[in-house]
Image: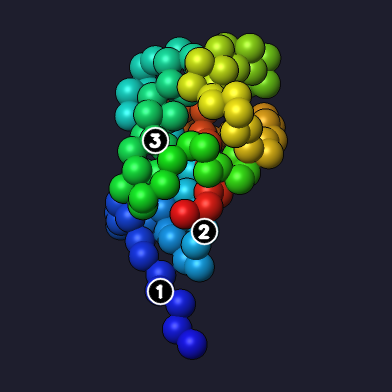
Amino acid sequence: MTVDIKRFAEENRLSGAVRHGGVLYLAGQVADDATLDTEGQTADILRQIDALLAEAGTDKSRLLSVQIFLTDINESVAMNRAWDAWLDPRHKPARATVEARLVDPAWRVEITAIAAC
């Protein structure tokens, strides 16, 4: 039995998302505009996540798990302002938030997720 694999938003080194067996795996998403503050970068990333989910035929109500990486854990309040404004409170995913160095020092936030399709 063959299970189809579909890739979305392919780049040189990665796909923005990969769907397999009814599950969508999102790569780490970072802000298009790295000059924004933490809240702004988070909102930008969540907009990108909405677009990837839609392209794959799903939405944020189907998120299963989210991992958020912050360069400064003290910025979690700012990140959560954008998160809370975006989140569907009836469909909260499992979530972890950790402090980490990111590839580009201008990035303050990176978010990856897994969703049902």
Residue type pointed to by label 1: Asp
Q: Which mark is residue 50?
A: 3
- Residue 65 in percent (x, y) is at 62, 44
* Mark 1 element type: loop
Seen at 63% across and 37% down, the residue is 93
- Residue 41 in percent (x, y) is at 43, 21
Q: Which of the colour schemes (rainbow, by chain, secondary structure, one colour) is used?
A: rainbow
- Residue 18 in percent (x, y) is at 43, 59
Mark 1 crowd level (few <14, some 14–19, many ≥20, 10 Å Cα): few
Seen at 67% across and 36% down, the residue is 95
Instruction: Give yes or no for contact between labels 2 and 1 (Cβ–Cβ under 8 Å).
Output: no
Who is closer to the viewer here, 41 or 35? 41
Instruction: Give yes or no for contact between labels 2 and 3 (Cβ–Cβ under 8 Å).
Output: no
Residue 13 visible here = no
* Mark 3 element type: helix
Distance from Cα at disc 2 to Cα at disc 3: 15 Å
Residue type pointed to by label 3: Asp
